[in-house]
Image (tube, rainbow, N blue to C red):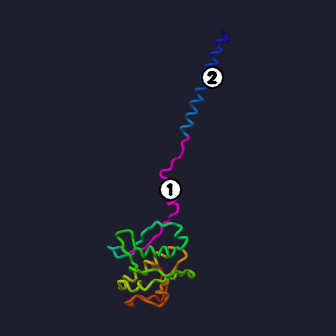
């Protein structure tokens, strides 16, 4: 009889220990949950960066930045040409209008110290609508956009490789470098 009672006690202890072990295992599983990100980041998104391009607001006439996502590889290969060509293409926001005249092409870009020399085709001056305010918007659009880059502090405008040109109405000439006015 003693052996039967001892055997029953051993069975009860084993069952109790097994039950406690199973309960604790399940609690651990519930605590350890695999992290699931809200949204996966695609390879394309990893390769993009944000740049600010300055365009004229149609309502206020003031220059405003327009954020644009571009591929990092384009910026690494030729940052200045890429950014100026985005300005030439114009805004994506329907409340903005382009400041660079239609037909303008960028012929050459060189960085000399902290001055970025931009050589535009003749259309830059020939196709411009004119007027000091519009001309200033065109220059400031370029300056504000390009001086967002840390290595650029001013820009110099050339037309077909020649310095000392001006817009056709003579209101604004390109003799001096243009810097950001803030």
Q: Position of residue 71 (x, y in %)?
A: 50, 66
Tag 1, which secondary structure?
loop
Residue 22 part of the magenta-drawn span: no
Q: Which mark is residue 41?
A: 1
Q: x, y (%) of residue 109? A: 52, 80
Quadrant where the image shows the N terminus: top right
Dot 1: within a 10 Å radius of its alpha carbon, few (fewer than 14), some, or many (20 or more) residues? few
Report the residue that reaches farthest toward the left: 59
Category of crowding for the residue at label 2, using alpha-carbon neighbours closer than 10 angstroms: few (below 14), some (14–19), many (at least 20): few
Q: Is residue 107 left or right of residue 137?
A: right
In this rendering, the count of numbered labels is: 2
Q: Nearer the viewer, residue 30 or 160?
A: 160
- Residue 75 drawn above or below residue 1: below
- The magenta region covers 32-55
* Numbered disc in front, either 1 or 2: 1
Residue 175 to residue 63: above or below: below
* Residue sitting at the far right: 3
In the image, residue 178 sits, relative to residue 57, either above or below, namely below
Q: Secondary structure at mark 2?
A: helix
Q: Residue at x 52, y 69 (%)?
A: 74
Q: Position of residue 174 (x, y in %)?
A: 46, 88
Residue at point 50%, 50% (across, down): 37
**Gap in Å between the C-alphas at discs 1 and 2?**
51 Å
Q: Which residue is mark 2?
A: 14
Indicate whether 69 appears above or below 85.
above
Of callouts 1 and 2, the N-terminal one: 2
Q: Is 50 a magenta residue?
A: yes
């Amino acid at each position: 009889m003693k052996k039967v009672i001892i055997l029953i006690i051993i069975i009860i202890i084993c069952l109790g220990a097994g039950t406690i072990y199973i309960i604790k295992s399940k609690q651990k599983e519930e605590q350890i949950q695999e992290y699931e990100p809200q949204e996966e980041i695609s390879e394309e998104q990893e390769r993009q960066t944000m740049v600010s391009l300055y365009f004229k607001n149609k309502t206020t006439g003031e220059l405003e930045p327009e954020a644009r996502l571009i591929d990092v590889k384009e910026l690494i290969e030729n940052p200045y040409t890429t950014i100026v060509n985005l300005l030439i293409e114009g805004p994506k926001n329907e409340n903005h209008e382009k400041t660079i005249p239609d037909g303008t092409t960028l012929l050459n870009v060189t960085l000399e110290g902290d001055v970025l020399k931009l050589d535009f085709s003749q259309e830059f001056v020939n196709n411009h609508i004119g007027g000091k305010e519009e001309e200033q918007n065109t220059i400031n659009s370029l300056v504000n956009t390009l001086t967002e880059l840390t290595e650029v502090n001013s820009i110099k405008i050339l037309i077909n490789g020649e310095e000392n040109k001006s817009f056709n109405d003579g209101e604004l000439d390109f003799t001096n470098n243009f810097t950001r006015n803030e």
